[in-house]
Image (spheres, rainbow, N blue to C red):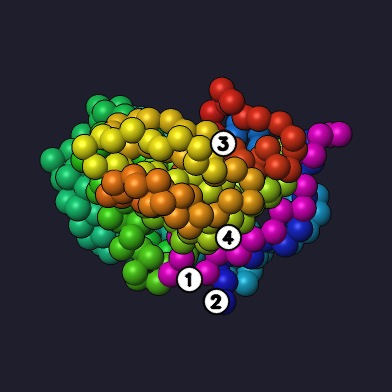
Amino acid sequence: MNAVVEVRHLVKRYGNFTAVDGVSFEVAAGQVFALLGPNGAGKTSTIRVLMGILYPDGGEVRLLGMPPQEAREQVGYLPEARGLYREARLLELLVYLGALKGLRTAEARRRALAWLERFGLSEWAERKVHELSHGMQQKAQLVAALMHDPPVLVLDEPFQGLDPVNIQLVKRLVADLRAEGKGVLLSSHQLVHVEALADEVALINRGRIVAQGPLEALRRQYARGDIAVGLAERAPLPPQLPVQKAEARHGLWYLLPEADVTPQEVLRALVDAGAPVERFEVVYPSLEEVFLRAVEETSGETMAGEEVQA
Protein backbone atom coordinates (compact mmCIF):
# COMPACT_ATOMS: atom_id res chain seq x y z
CA MET A 1 0.00 0.00 0.00
CA ASN A 2 1.31 3.45 -0.94
CA ALA A 3 0.75 5.06 2.46
CA VAL A 4 0.65 8.86 2.65
CA VAL A 5 -0.29 8.85 6.35
CA GLU A 6 1.34 6.41 8.78
CA VAL A 7 0.50 6.24 12.47
CA ARG A 8 2.38 3.67 14.53
CA HIS A 9 1.51 2.94 18.18
CA LEU A 10 0.69 6.59 18.84
CA VAL A 11 0.46 7.66 22.49
CA LYS A 12 -0.61 11.10 23.70
CA ARG A 13 -0.93 12.00 27.37
CA TYR A 14 -2.18 15.04 29.25
CA GLY A 15 -0.65 14.76 32.68
CA ASN A 16 -1.75 11.40 34.07
CA PHE A 17 -4.52 11.01 31.49
CA THR A 18 -3.79 8.96 28.38
CA ALA A 19 -5.91 10.37 25.54
CA VAL A 20 -4.43 8.21 22.78
CA ASP A 21 -3.22 4.75 23.71
CA GLY A 22 -1.30 2.83 21.04
CA VAL A 23 -3.27 3.88 17.96
CA SER A 24 -2.04 2.60 14.58
CA PHE A 25 -3.43 3.06 11.07
CA GLU A 26 -2.45 4.03 7.53
CA VAL A 27 -4.08 6.11 4.82
CA ALA A 28 -3.20 5.25 1.24
CA ALA A 29 -3.06 7.49 -1.79
CA GLY A 30 -6.46 7.39 -3.50
CA GLN A 31 -8.24 6.33 -0.29
CA VAL A 32 -10.83 7.94 1.97
CA PHE A 33 -10.11 6.82 5.53
CA ALA A 34 -12.60 7.70 8.28
CA LEU A 35 -11.47 8.11 11.89
CA LEU A 36 -14.53 8.11 14.14
CA GLY A 37 -15.32 8.09 17.83
CA PRO A 38 -17.48 9.58 20.59
CA ASN A 39 -16.64 12.76 22.47
CA GLY A 40 -13.35 12.39 24.30
CA ALA A 41 -12.32 9.25 22.41
CA GLY A 42 -8.91 10.59 21.37
CA LYS A 43 -9.70 11.36 17.75
CA THR A 44 -9.02 15.11 17.94
CA SER A 45 -5.73 14.54 19.79
CA THR A 46 -4.69 12.08 17.08
CA ILE A 47 -5.43 14.60 14.33
CA ARG A 48 -3.56 17.37 16.15
CA VAL A 49 -0.49 15.18 16.45
CA LEU A 50 -0.80 14.38 12.75
CA MET A 51 -0.85 18.08 11.94
CA GLY A 52 2.17 18.84 14.13
CA ILE A 53 0.09 20.92 16.54
CA LEU A 54 0.87 18.50 19.37
CA TYR A 55 3.89 16.28 19.90
CA PRO A 56 3.38 12.57 20.67
CA ASP A 57 4.45 10.99 23.93
CA GLY A 58 5.09 7.69 22.20
CA GLY A 59 4.94 6.02 18.82
CA GLU A 60 5.59 7.52 15.42
CA VAL A 61 3.67 9.60 12.87
CA ARG A 62 4.66 10.17 9.23
CA LEU A 63 3.03 12.24 6.48
CA LEU A 64 4.40 11.48 3.03
CA GLY A 65 7.29 9.77 4.80
CA MET A 66 8.16 12.88 6.81
CA PRO A 67 7.53 14.14 10.35
CA PRO A 68 4.37 16.28 10.45
CA GLN A 69 6.28 19.52 11.00
CA GLU A 70 8.17 18.97 7.73
CA ALA A 71 5.11 18.02 5.67
CA ARG A 72 2.77 20.89 6.55
CA GLU A 73 2.93 22.61 3.16
CA GLN A 74 1.87 19.38 1.45
CA VAL A 75 -1.20 18.80 3.62
CA GLY A 76 -4.62 20.42 3.34
CA TYR A 77 -6.18 20.76 6.79
CA LEU A 78 -9.77 21.63 7.63
CA PRO A 79 -9.81 21.96 11.44
CA GLU A 80 -12.92 21.35 13.51
CA ALA A 81 -12.44 24.78 15.12
CA ARG A 82 -12.64 27.25 12.22
CA GLY A 83 -10.35 30.28 12.24
CA LEU A 84 -10.66 32.66 9.28
CA TYR A 85 -9.83 36.32 9.90
CA ARG A 86 -13.26 37.91 10.19
CA GLU A 87 -12.29 41.42 9.03
CA ALA A 88 -10.34 40.27 5.96
CA ARG A 89 -11.85 40.30 2.48
CA LEU A 90 -12.39 36.73 1.30
CA LEU A 91 -10.29 36.71 -1.87
CA GLU A 92 -7.48 38.71 -0.27
CA LEU A 93 -7.39 36.25 2.64
CA LEU A 94 -7.31 33.19 0.39
CA VAL A 95 -4.47 34.64 -1.69
CA TYR A 96 -2.53 35.30 1.53
CA LEU A 97 -3.12 31.75 2.79
CA GLY A 98 -2.08 30.36 -0.59
CA ALA A 99 1.16 32.34 -0.39
CA LEU A 100 1.84 30.80 3.03
CA LYS A 101 1.62 27.41 1.30
CA GLY A 102 4.24 28.43 -1.25
CA LEU A 103 2.09 29.75 -4.13
CA ARG A 104 3.04 32.87 -6.06
CA THR A 105 0.51 35.68 -5.67
CA ALA A 106 -0.84 35.48 -9.23
CA GLU A 107 -1.22 31.71 -9.05
CA ALA A 108 -2.84 31.87 -5.63
CA ARG A 109 -5.35 34.40 -6.97
CA ARG A 110 -6.13 32.28 -10.04
CA ARG A 111 -6.70 29.15 -7.96
CA ALA A 112 -8.73 30.98 -5.32
CA LEU A 113 -11.06 32.42 -7.97
CA ALA A 114 -11.50 29.01 -9.58
CA TRP A 115 -12.40 27.38 -6.26
CA LEU A 116 -14.73 30.21 -5.28
CA GLU A 117 -16.59 29.70 -8.53
CA ARG A 118 -16.82 25.96 -7.95
CA PHE A 119 -18.27 26.56 -4.48
CA GLY A 120 -20.68 29.27 -5.60
CA LEU A 121 -18.84 32.04 -3.75
CA SER A 122 -17.61 34.20 -6.64
CA GLU A 123 -20.01 37.03 -5.79
CA TRP A 124 -18.64 37.14 -2.25
CA ALA A 125 -14.95 37.40 -3.20
CA GLU A 126 -14.64 41.05 -2.14
CA ARG A 127 -16.83 40.76 0.96
CA LYS A 128 -15.42 40.52 4.46
CA VAL A 129 -15.43 37.11 6.07
CA HIS A 130 -17.81 38.15 8.84
CA GLU A 131 -20.42 39.03 6.19
CA LEU A 132 -20.55 35.41 5.02
CA SER A 133 -23.00 32.91 6.47
CA HIS A 134 -21.69 30.03 8.57
CA GLY A 135 -22.05 27.66 5.63
CA MET A 136 -20.22 30.06 3.31
CA GLN A 137 -17.37 30.36 5.80
CA GLN A 138 -17.20 26.58 5.93
CA LYS A 139 -16.81 26.40 2.16
CA ALA A 140 -14.26 29.22 2.23
CA GLN A 141 -12.18 27.28 4.77
CA LEU A 142 -12.35 24.25 2.47
CA VAL A 143 -11.00 26.41 -0.35
CA ALA A 144 -8.10 27.43 1.91
CA ALA A 145 -7.33 23.75 2.53
CA LEU A 146 -7.48 22.80 -1.15
CA MET A 147 -6.04 25.61 -3.23
CA HIS A 148 -2.37 24.53 -2.98
CA ASP A 149 -3.39 21.11 -4.42
CA PRO A 150 -2.03 18.99 -1.55
CA PRO A 151 -1.61 15.21 -1.94
CA VAL A 152 -3.00 14.67 1.58
CA LEU A 153 -6.22 16.13 3.04
CA VAL A 154 -7.26 16.02 6.70
CA LEU A 155 -10.92 17.06 6.89
CA ASP A 156 -12.38 17.37 10.38
CA GLU A 157 -16.17 17.82 10.28
CA PRO A 158 -16.34 18.90 6.61
CA PHE A 159 -20.18 18.82 6.55
CA GLN A 160 -20.60 21.07 9.57
CA GLY A 161 -23.05 23.92 8.99
CA LEU A 162 -23.89 22.94 5.41
CA ASP A 163 -27.34 22.57 3.88
CA PRO A 164 -28.24 19.40 1.89
CA VAL A 165 -27.22 20.94 -1.45
CA ASN A 166 -23.76 21.89 -0.20
CA ILE A 167 -23.34 18.57 1.61
CA GLN A 168 -23.73 16.87 -1.77
CA LEU A 169 -21.20 19.32 -3.24
CA VAL A 170 -18.65 18.40 -0.57
CA LYS A 171 -19.32 14.68 -0.98
CA ARG A 172 -18.66 14.98 -4.72
CA LEU A 173 -15.51 16.92 -3.93
CA VAL A 174 -14.20 14.19 -1.61
CA ALA A 175 -14.97 11.55 -4.26
CA ASP A 176 -13.09 13.64 -6.83
CA LEU A 177 -10.09 13.98 -4.53
CA ARG A 178 -9.97 10.21 -4.14
CA ALA A 179 -10.20 9.74 -7.93
CA GLU A 180 -7.25 12.13 -8.31
CA GLY A 181 -5.16 9.83 -6.11
CA LYS A 182 -5.13 11.96 -3.00
CA GLY A 183 -5.24 10.47 0.49
CA VAL A 184 -8.15 11.79 2.55
CA LEU A 185 -8.44 11.41 6.33
CA LEU A 186 -12.06 12.20 7.14
CA SER A 187 -13.82 12.67 10.44
CA SER A 188 -17.48 13.55 10.87
CA HIS A 189 -20.30 12.81 13.30
CA GLN A 190 -22.72 12.70 10.33
CA LEU A 191 -22.14 9.00 9.80
CA VAL A 192 -24.59 8.61 6.94
CA HIS A 193 -22.29 10.77 4.80
CA VAL A 194 -19.20 8.91 5.97
CA GLU A 195 -20.80 5.63 4.93
CA ALA A 196 -21.20 6.94 1.39
CA LEU A 197 -17.52 7.92 1.12
CA ALA A 198 -15.20 5.87 3.32
CA ASP A 199 -13.11 3.03 1.92
CA GLU A 200 -11.82 2.13 5.35
CA VAL A 201 -12.88 3.03 8.89
CA ALA A 202 -11.17 3.11 12.27
CA LEU A 203 -13.45 3.33 15.31
CA ILE A 204 -11.72 4.75 18.38
CA ASN A 205 -12.99 4.70 21.95
CA ARG A 206 -11.17 5.71 25.14
CA GLY A 207 -7.98 6.23 23.20
CA ARG A 208 -7.91 2.83 21.54
CA ILE A 209 -9.09 1.55 18.19
CA VAL A 210 -11.92 -0.91 18.81
CA ALA A 211 -12.60 -1.86 15.19
CA GLN A 212 -10.86 -1.18 11.91
CA GLY A 213 -11.12 -2.28 8.31
CA PRO A 214 -13.04 -1.82 5.06
CA LEU A 215 -16.56 -0.63 5.82
CA GLU A 216 -18.35 -3.56 4.18
CA ALA A 217 -16.14 -6.05 6.02
CA LEU A 218 -16.98 -4.37 9.33
CA ARG A 219 -20.69 -4.43 8.55
CA ARG A 220 -20.49 -8.16 7.91
CA GLN A 221 -18.31 -8.75 10.95
CA TYR A 222 -20.78 -7.05 13.29
CA ALA A 223 -23.97 -8.32 11.68
CA ARG A 224 -26.19 -10.23 14.10
CA GLY A 225 -28.07 -12.20 11.51
CA ASP A 226 -31.06 -9.84 11.33
CA ILE A 227 -33.35 -10.67 8.42
CA ALA A 228 -35.95 -8.57 6.59
CA VAL A 229 -38.89 -10.53 5.20
CA GLY A 230 -41.67 -9.26 2.96
CA LEU A 231 -44.81 -11.40 2.66
CA ALA A 232 -47.39 -11.04 -0.11
CA GLU A 233 -50.50 -9.05 0.79
CA ARG A 234 -49.13 -8.52 4.29
CA ALA A 235 -49.73 -12.12 5.23
CA PRO A 236 -49.21 -13.02 8.89
CA LEU A 237 -45.92 -14.51 9.98
CA PRO A 238 -46.12 -18.31 10.47
CA PRO A 239 -45.82 -19.50 14.09
CA GLN A 240 -42.93 -21.53 15.50
CA LEU A 241 -40.18 -20.10 13.33
CA PRO A 242 -36.61 -20.58 14.65
CA VAL A 243 -36.33 -16.91 15.64
CA GLN A 244 -35.96 -15.25 19.01
CA LYS A 245 -37.47 -11.95 17.93
CA ALA A 246 -39.93 -10.76 15.25
CA GLU A 247 -40.94 -7.16 14.70
CA ALA A 248 -43.19 -5.62 12.03
CA ARG A 249 -41.97 -2.30 10.59
CA HIS A 250 -42.94 -0.45 7.42
CA GLY A 251 -44.62 -3.45 5.82
CA LEU A 252 -41.76 -5.87 6.55
CA TRP A 253 -40.99 -8.40 9.23
CA TYR A 254 -37.59 -8.03 10.91
CA LEU A 255 -36.43 -11.32 12.38
CA LEU A 256 -33.54 -12.20 14.67
CA PRO A 257 -32.73 -15.93 14.32
CA GLU A 258 -32.14 -18.13 17.32
CA ALA A 259 -28.53 -18.82 18.25
CA ASP A 260 -26.73 -20.98 15.65
CA VAL A 261 -29.67 -20.73 13.21
CA THR A 262 -28.62 -19.54 9.74
CA PRO A 263 -30.67 -17.25 7.48
CA GLN A 264 -31.04 -20.17 5.07
CA GLU A 265 -32.71 -22.23 7.79
CA VAL A 266 -35.15 -19.40 8.51
CA LEU A 267 -36.01 -19.15 4.81
CA ARG A 268 -36.55 -22.92 4.62
CA ALA A 269 -38.88 -22.76 7.63
CA LEU A 270 -40.89 -19.98 5.99
CA VAL A 271 -41.23 -21.90 2.73
CA ASP A 272 -42.12 -25.14 4.53
CA ALA A 273 -44.85 -23.24 6.39
CA GLY A 274 -46.30 -22.00 3.10
CA ALA A 275 -45.50 -18.33 3.73
CA PRO A 276 -45.82 -16.23 0.53
CA VAL A 277 -42.28 -14.82 0.64
CA GLU A 278 -41.71 -11.91 -1.74
CA ARG A 279 -38.58 -10.48 -0.14
CA PHE A 280 -35.86 -12.01 1.98
CA GLU A 281 -32.54 -10.40 2.82
CA VAL A 282 -29.91 -10.31 5.53
CA VAL A 283 -29.81 -6.83 7.08
CA TYR A 284 -26.32 -5.50 7.72
CA PRO A 285 -25.80 -2.89 10.43
CA SER A 286 -25.25 0.79 9.73
CA LEU A 287 -21.90 2.38 10.55
CA GLU A 288 -23.34 3.74 13.79
CA GLU A 289 -24.62 0.28 14.77
CA VAL A 290 -21.20 -1.20 13.99
CA PHE A 291 -19.60 1.33 16.30
CA LEU A 292 -22.02 0.68 19.15
CA ARG A 293 -21.57 -3.07 18.87
CA ALA A 294 -17.77 -2.78 18.73
CA VAL A 295 -17.73 -0.67 21.88
CA GLU A 296 -20.07 -3.07 23.68
CA GLU A 297 -17.84 -6.02 22.80
CA THR A 298 -14.60 -4.36 23.87
CA SER A 299 -15.71 -2.52 27.01
CA GLY A 300 -18.86 -4.32 28.11
CA GLU A 301 -20.68 -0.99 28.10
CA THR A 302 -23.48 0.40 26.00
CA MET A 303 -23.28 3.76 24.29
CA ALA A 304 -27.00 4.45 24.42
CA GLY A 305 -27.72 8.15 24.48
CA GLU A 306 -24.11 9.17 23.77
CA GLU A 307 -23.45 11.01 20.55
CA VAL A 308 -21.15 9.15 18.20
CA GLN A 309 -18.98 11.71 16.53
CA ALA A 310 -15.47 12.63 15.57
Would you name the residue on which mark 4 appears? 213
| Residues marked 3 and 4 touching at CB (< 8 Å) | no
Would you name the residue on which mark 1 appears? 29
Residue nearest the observer in this picture, 126 or 164 = 164
Residue drawn at the location 55% of the way across and 54% of the way down: 262
Quarter-wise, where is residue 89 in the image? Answer: top left
* Residue range highlighted in magenta: 15-35
| Residues marked 2 and 4 touching at CB (< 8 Å) | no
- The amino acid pointed to by label 4 is Gly
| Residues marked 2 and 3 touching at CB (< 8 Å) | no
- The amino acid pointed to by label 1 is Ala
| Residues marked 2 and 1 touching at CB (< 8 Å) | yes
Residue nearest the observer in this picture, 49 or 253 = 253
Where is 267 relative to 156, above or below?
below
Residue 126's x, y, as percent?
19, 39
Quarter-wise, where is residue 148 in the image? Answer: bottom left
Instruction: Say how many tags the image has.
Output: 4
Residue drawn at the location 28% of the way across and 35% of the way down: 235
Would you name the residue on which mark 2 appears? 2
Density class for disc 2 (Cα within 10 Å; few <14, some 14-19, many ≥20) is: few
Residue nearest the observer in this picture, 155 or 71 = 155
Give the mark nearest the N terminus, 1 or 3.
Answer: 1
- The amino acid pointed to by label 3 is Gln
Residue 157's x, y, as percent?
45, 40
- The mark closer to the camera, 2 or 3, is 3
Would you name the residue on which mark 3 appears? 244
- The mark closer to the camera, 4 or 1, is 4
The C terminus appears in which quarter of the rendering?
top right
Magenta highlight on residue 166: no
